[in-house]
Amino acid sequence: MLIRPPVRALPIDPLLPEICEKTLAERVLVLEAEPGAGKTTRVPLALHRAGLTTEGVIVVAEPRRLAARLAAEYVSRELGERVGGTVGYSVRFEEETSRDTRIVYATEGVLMRRLLQDPELGSVSAVVLDEFHERHLATDVLLALVDRLRRTTRPKLALVVMSATLDAGPLAEHLGAKRVRSEGRAFPLTIEHQTRPDDRPVERQVASAVRKLLAEEATGDVLVFLPGAREIRMASEALSGERTPENVLVLPLHGDLPMKDQARAVEPARERKVILSTNVAESSVTIDGVTAVVDTGLARVAGHSPWSGLPTLATAKISRASAVQRAGRAGRTRPGRVIRLYTEGDLATRDAHDKPEILRDDLSETFLGLHGMGVRNPAELRWLAPPPPAAAEAADALLRRLGALAPDGALSPTGRRMLAFPVSPRLARVLVEGERRGVAADTCVAVALLSERDIRTGVRTAFQGGRPGIDASGPSDVLELMERFHEAEGEDFHPRRLGSMGLDGRAVQAVDRVRRQLARIARDSGPRPDSIDGVDEAIQIALLAGFPDRIAKRRSKTDRSLSLWSGKSARLLETSVVHDAPLVVALDAEESRGTVVVRLASAMRLDWLFELYPEAVEMSEELAWNPTTEAVDRVSRISSGSVVLEEERSPAKPSEEVSRVLVEAALAKSPPLVQADEKLSALRERLELLRREVPEADLPDLGAGVVNAAVERAAAGRTRLSELRGVDLGDELLSGLGYAERALLEKEAPVHLTLPGGRTVPVHYDPGKPPWVESRLQDFFGMSRTPTVAKGRVPLTVHLLAPNQRAVQVTTDLAGFWERHYPGIRKELCRRYPRHSWPEDGATAVPPPPKRR
């Protein structure tokens, strides 16, 4: 027989009669009470004693397993009973209740499953939503569902919403409920802030603050809030030095720990304790002995990208409301002390409340559950904060992709079977496919491994920056994990043996618990493969069934870079055993700061996807430019999402469409083909010169359209750029001009100029320059005036070359050259080239005949 401990007074006690009276009368109530007021343990018991359980049980929904179990144990002790008597709890894979149980502390997920099995909550008389200020996704969904029941088929169902920090005005208005507020806490708090930002690593800041508290406070335990398990480990290592007293226990507390290890952290101990916790300790009953809190002001915030379909995880600053909640853990049994590792100014700039999960989380599991409860359109519900349209559309799209919904939006047989499993829709789909392929027991192990933390200690160490990962190679990380799990099973999960095998005993046991729970539900509906390879393949196909939008293609055989279905790039961790498979399924992937990391992958084959989701496979054929061969290829592709699963190229046969692609490539080439063709470029310059200087000729504009048309004519029947290069594009352009226009062009913008001695030299028409010619100075003897073009309106620039082919003069005034410059230049030329004839008057001199070739 248990001895009932003395019940100490709590701030909520004077309000209990009012709370019970309003709840019984109105059947709905919103309660605000500061941390430590006693609402979690006192209110449900008071409602029970007021007669609210005569028609059913009171279910108190808690956001975390630890809070549900501790609350049930606390209230049971006050009643002098064991857990499972009047008060019990129900959490994932663990339940302590009996026929006599009238108050059940349950996690929000468990209550959601109860609603799925009994949408009317026929055996429940009241639902209490505790710690509502945290605004978990399940909390918002439960609020909408219970409120719907109250307004329709269960008007007598009572609803009490309790919050520690939320401004309950909008909530009370939403529910049409009365508000009750409990002012004050049990004991005062002393709160200290940093005077300036501290740039040291967070674990060193924590170690300094903890040692300060241990030195200045003679008694009492210290609760430290850190963002995640990694920071807890590092802080524990920082506190393991000689400066920490030997009689102090440093204990971790986070959601991945087994319940017995969580219990060790929160239960009384002879030694003084330092509890290193994530925000799991924000919402739980009083942890006896805690008199001081160290708050890093940080938390790991999970989210979901509706655009990529990937979960996100980021370390972020907590809200002001969360800071109040954390501080309140210190003043519950006596005056408390709080050290915040951030400045008061920093606190003032933070958000007032945490962003509700419904605005940032994956909604697919919620929507599947709503379908199971008959809510086909989530918009039917009265949401306190409606789901974002993009997230709602992404959830609906995923359920349809998994085959959980029929084309008309109703729940399909596959979706109904998925609801039987207390896991995410993706993992439920893996289990359903495993049942169909006769490997239900195997996929239970696979799903348990995917739903819990990695059982390999070495892999987790490597991810946290420690020693490198394993060297094993195989087709699937999940198959590798299953093999390791079965090895542990063969050792009866003996902790020491598991440690020597590089396995985390607690993680292995957690996987085993989930595996057993799922195995009680799963059943084979198809024949089992008759070989080990067949079983492995069936498991891999089942994994693909749950992750059809996580298909990825390796960019090269030796590269761990992946192209994802969503269009993003990702990196496969070195710890993955899938070394060379060209196509994989990214089973455990996470996006952080724009970078996607894939921890676990499984090889896949194209024919599996055709078998499972033929509608997700797109087959296409198109013409594409091949920059390597500079030719048009015909490309056949098989793709899914943004991933090209298979591609085949072959040379394209001539056609109008092929010519169009060839023209586009020629014009897009850098420099474009039309610019690289000197003859074509000169022709354009000649025409432009005449259009400018002889406007009365009314020559056509040789713009891009005319040039492109010439290129198109030249490309007809061709498939390669090399073939197009062999075509005289200038002739193609000339062919588009009339006879008179061509004659004018040849006369007034000639391509050659004949000099007095008979030598013919080209006339150069360069973009942005006047037209010009060049030749030996002697070739211009007898030419007294500068040659011109464009009906004599444009003088040619003449480059006069010495015998060494270097210009001695460049001029547009040949007459002036002979008169003013030639006498001086002649003397130098006579000296340097005495064998050549240099007559005194170049304007009348006879030029030498052109050399014969």
Image (cartoon, rainbow, N blue to C red):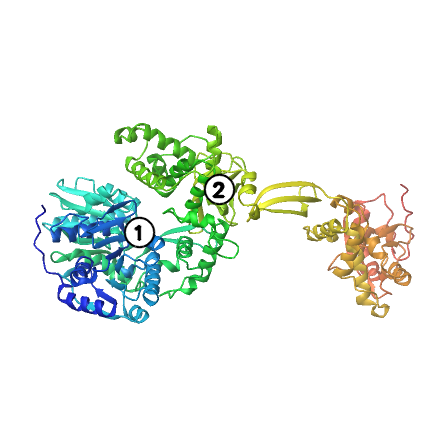
Q: Would you call the spot at circle 2 few (<14 residues within 10 Å), some (14-19), or many (20 or more)?
A: many
**Residue holding disc 1:** 110
Q: Would you call the spot at circle 1 few (<14 residues within 10 Å), some (14-19), or many (20 or more)?
A: many
Depth check: 341 or 280 in front?
280
Depth check: 781 or 544 in front?
544
User: Picture coordinates of residue 468 (x, y %)?
Assistant: 38, 34
User: Picture coordinates of residue 213 (x, y %)?
Assistant: 15, 51
Helix or strand or loop: what does disc 2 sit on? Answer: helix
User: Picture coordinates of residue 578 (x, y %)?
Assistant: 47, 35
> Does residue 651 sit above or below 307 in this rendering?
above
Sequence-wise, which precedes: disc 2 or disc 1?
Answer: 1
At label 1, the amino acid type is: Val
* Quadrant position of residue 149: bottom left
User: Could you tell me if residue 575 is visible in this image?
Assistant: no
Residue under the image location 85 percent in, 43 percent down = 835
User: Could you tell me if residue 157 is visible in this image?
Assistant: yes
User: Picture coordinates of residue 58 (x, y %)?
Assistant: 23, 58
**Residue holding disc 2:** 544
Kindly report which numbered mark, 2 or 1, lies closer to the viewer in this rendering: 1
* Quadrant position of residue 148: bottom left
Depth check: 604 or 69 in front?
69
Helix or strand or loop: what does disc 1 sit on? Answer: helix
Depth check: 440 or 850 in front?
440
Quarter of the figure with the C terminus: top right
**Which mark is drawn over residue 242?**
none
At label 2, the amino acid type is: Leu
Measured in 3D between alpha carbons, the distance from the residue under mark 2 to the one under mark 1, in whole angstroms, is 28 Å
Q: Is residue 598 left or right of residue 318?
A: right
